[in-house]
Amino acid sequence: MQLSETTNVPTSKDSITVYLDPELHEALKEWARQQKRSKSFVAAELIEEAVKAWQKTQEREQS
């Protein structure tokens, strides 16, 4: 699954490619469907939350 789905809309955001197990991909697809969002949007939100949590952990460890 590519996180930045191909569209004709120009974007300044970077893109990455992620390979998922079929079960995880189906779960992400269902989650996106229920939210009426793209898989890319849901995945980007999850990654953003995870990175923010990791950054907080890093800040605590450096204190």
Image: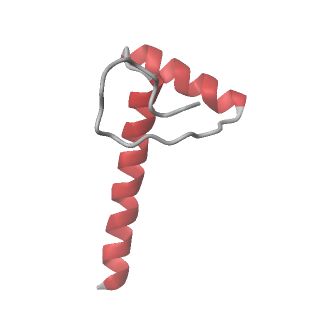
At which x and y percent is residue 58? 37, 73
Q: Nearer the viewer, residue 10 or 20?
A: 10
Question: For this view, does 62 lie left or right of residue 28?
Answer: left
Question: For this view, does 3 lie left or right of residue 61?
Answer: right
The residue sitting at 38% across, 43% down in the picture is 14
Residue 57 against residue 31 in the figure, above or below:
below
As drawn, the residue found furthest toward the right would be: 22
Q: Nearer the viewer, residue 24 or 14?
A: 14
The residue sitting at 69% across, 28% down in the picture is 23
Q: Nearer the viewer, residue 10 or 34?
A: 10
Residue 56: quarter of image = bottom left
As drawn, the residue found furthest toward the bottom would be: 63
Point out the image quarter for the C terminus.
bottom left
Residue 7 against residue 53 in the figure, above or below:
above
Residue 1: quarter of image = top right
Residue 48 against residue 30 in the figure, above or below:
below
The residue sitting at 35% across, 65% down in the picture is 55
At which x and y percent is residue 13? 33, 40
The residue sitting at 38% across, 70% down in the picture is 57
At which x and y percent is residue 48? 36, 47
Residue 28: quarter of image = top right
Q: Nearer the viewer, residue 26 or 10?
A: 10
How is this picture coloured? Answer: secondary structure
